[in-house]
Image (cartoon, rainbow, N blue to C red):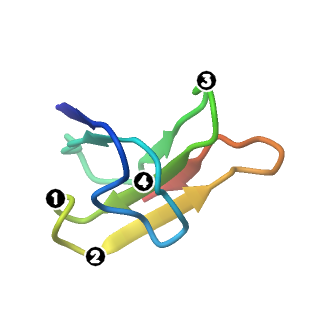
Amino acid sequence: MRTQRGGLSNFAGSCGGEGTEGVFGFTPSETGPVCLDTAGSVGDTVLYVREQNCAEGDELACNDDVDFPDTTSKVQI
């Protein structure tokens, strides 16, 4: 599921995120670590993961810039 919002972020991660946001829902089919990234994205990205929906739940991970000058983002949860 994806919801695209224009303008400023309604929910920012602790490591940044004040631009246009894309919101995705994800339910893993099995237990174990999950790696998420924005590789291939154009522009500077911030990636953060919440335990529940955007407005609720603790932040599990947040990354802004994998390794500068690479401005994509990557987290493992």
Q: What is the quadrant of the C terminus in the image? A: bottom left
Q: Label 4, label 3: how many angstroms apart (C-alpha)?
A: 22 Å
* Left or right, residue 16 beside residue 68: left
The residue pinned by badge 1 equals 53
Find numbered disc 4 in the image and state the secondary structure of the residue it sits on: loop
The residue pinned by badge 3 equals 40
Q: Label 4, label 1: how many angstroms apart (C-alpha)?
A: 19 Å
Q: Which of the marked residues, 1 or 3, is nearer the chain's N terminus?
A: 3
* Left or right, residue 37 beside residue 30: right
Q: Which of the marked residues, 4 or 3, is nearer the chain's N terminus?
A: 4
Q: Residue at x 31, y 37 (%)?
A: 6
Q: Quadrant of residue 21?
A: top left
Residue 7, compared with residue 57, is above or below; it is above
* Left or right, residue 51 beside residue 71: left
Residue 10, compared with residue 24, is above or below; it is below
Instruction: Nearest to the eye among marks 4 and 3: give it.
Output: 3
Q: Nearer the viewer, residue 49 or 55?
A: 55
Residue type highlighted by circle 2? Asp
* Left or right, residue 73 beside residue 32: right
Find numbered disc 1 in the image and state the secondary structure of the residue it sits on: loop
The residue pinned by badge 4 equals 33
The residue pinned by badge 2 equals 58
The percent coordinates of residue 57 (x first, y second) are 20, 72
Q: Which of the marked residues, 2 or 3, is nearer the chain's N terminus?
A: 3
Q: Residue at x 18, y 45 (%)?
A: 27
Q: Quadrant of residue 61?
A: bottom left
Residue type highlighted by circle 4? Pro
Residue 26, compared with residue 64, is above or below; it is above
The percent coordinates of residue 22 (x first, y second) are 33, 38
- For the residues labelled 4 and 2, say whether their Cβ atoms are less than 8 Å apart: no
